[in-house]
Structures are given as C-alpha cells and as structure tokens.
Amino acid sequence: MIIKTVQFVKSAVKPSQYPEYDFPEIAFAGRSNVGKSSLINTLIQRKDMVKTSSKPGCTQLINFFMINEILSFVDLPGYGYAKVSKKIRAQWQPMVELYLSHRQNLLGLILLIDIRRDPQKEEFDMMDWLETHDIPYLVILTKSDKLSKTNQQKRLLSICTRLGREKNGVILFSTKTKQGRDTVLEEIENLMGI
Ligand code: GDP
C-alpha cells in the first residue's frame, strides 16, 4: 500500500466521541515507550504526525488518523508505564476495552512488543481478549535495530515460542532501518482484503 494522504481526524476517550464514519480501522496497541508513535509515523512517512512520547504514559486518548481517505489508523493509549498515577492506569482498561469490544469499524489490531523484552501478562491478556472477540491481530517486534541480525532471529524464535505463534506470524520492525515497513503495510492490505 502506498500512503498518499494522512489526516488527523480527532481524539476521543469514549464511544460518543469516536468519528462517525464507516471506514475500516486498524488499531495500534502496546506498552508505553514500545515505539508505537514512531512506528505509525514511519508507516505514514510523517516525522511527527503522531507525537512521540516526551511524557510517557500521559496521553490517555484514542487518536484517529485517516489514511488515503479509505482507512483509519487508531492509536490506542500505551499501557504499563510504571510512573503514571493509579487513576490514569485505571482509566486505560475500560477505555481500550470499550473501543475493542464495541467499535464496528475495527478490522484488526497491531500489537507491538519491544524485541528486547519478553511478552508480559498485559500482552497475553490482550491476545486472549482479541482471540475471544475474534479480532485479527498482528504482532510486531519493535526496535529491531538495537540487536544484531543473529540476535534478532534468536529473539524472534524465543518470543514466537512464548506466544505460541509461527515465525512468519511475527514481524521485525525498526524505525531506524525501516525493516518491516513494507511487510506491515502488506499485512494491512491483507486485512482489508485488497
Ligand atoms: P511510544 O510511547 O510507544 O509511542 O514510543 P515512541 O515512539 O515515543 O518511542 C519511544 C522511544 O523509543 C523514543 O525515544 C524513540 O526514539 C525510540 N524508538 C522508537 N522506535 C525505535 C526504533 O525502531 N529503533 C530505535 N533504536 N529506537 C526507537
């Protein structure tokens, strides 16, 4: 997919604020600081359309972006940042669960995991939730450039084993080298059936 146009649509915290359109949506989720904003900016080839986290964990908004006027990217708030208040942490789950369980437009989700970290309870919970609700998802290992090619493959295998997924079901990604960018865009096209 070639991304020609990108527009910020709006931010929302609750369903009544979601955009009222029928476009399919691809949502992005991951732990704070996993590289989610950077990944979306890399996909859309904009330097800072999605703000990278100067204050990790503080943005508790769902942000909607229109892509090529046919598709929307939905940036879900990051989870698991130790320093946010209990109140912010308590808001995250209902906000994201409401979106995932009620949004008719949702076509699939992209779950990001830092290649250097083992998946934690949050990632397993998210995958269980998605499987229970029949929402297709892709797993992306971010910041692959932080490791040598050999170690990337080792981590890929180890994480796939933990997740119980095939090696080709997990994508290595780097905003620095652009590794994985084309594959992610192809997978999004597959989800869209184009
Ligand atoms: P978010 O909180 O998930 O949105 O994460 P950000 O996109 O703000 O990234 C968090 C930090 O990781 C920033 O300092 C980024 O520059 C850095 N980062 C993100 N992606 C990559 C990557 O692919 N490679 C490297 N080396 N650093 C990255």
Image (cartoon, rainbow, N blue to C red):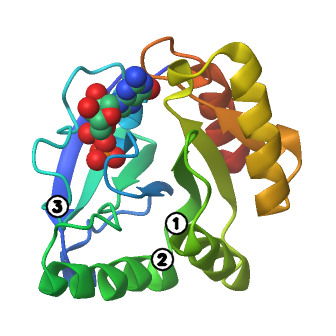
- Callout 2: SS: helix
Residue drawn where x is 62% and y is 81% of the image: 129
Dot 2 alpha-carbon crowd within 10 angstroms: few under 14, some 14 to 19, many 20 or more: many
| Residue 26 circle label | none
In this figure, which residue is indicated by the disc labeled 1?
106
Q: Are marks 2 and 3 in contact (CB under 8 Å)?
A: no
Query: Which residue is disc 2 drawn over?
Result: 100
Closer to the N terminus: mark 2 or mark 3?
A: 3
Tell me the CA gap for discs 1 and 2.
7 Å
Foreground of the two, 69 or 63: 63
In the picture provided, is 60 more to the left or to the right than 67? left
Look at 17% across and 85% down and name the residue there: 86
Q: Amino acid at mark 1?
A: Leu
Reply above or below: 8 against 49. Answer: below
Residue placed under numbered mark 3 in the picture: 11
Q: Quadrant of residue 118?
A: bottom right
Q: Earlier in the sequence, mark 1 or mark 2?
A: 2
Amino acid type assigned to the residue bearing label 3 in the image: Ser
Residue 68 visible in the picture = no
Residue name at image x 27 percent, y 21 percent: 46
Image quadrant in which the N terminus is located: top right
Rendered location of residue 138, percent (x, y): 66, 51
3D distance between C-alphas at marks 2 and 3:
16 Å
Mark 1 touching mark 2, by CB under 8 A?
A: yes
In-image side of 21 versus 183 (left or right): left
Q: Which quadrant of the rendered structure holds the C terminus?
A: top right
Q: Secondary structure at mark 3?
A: strand
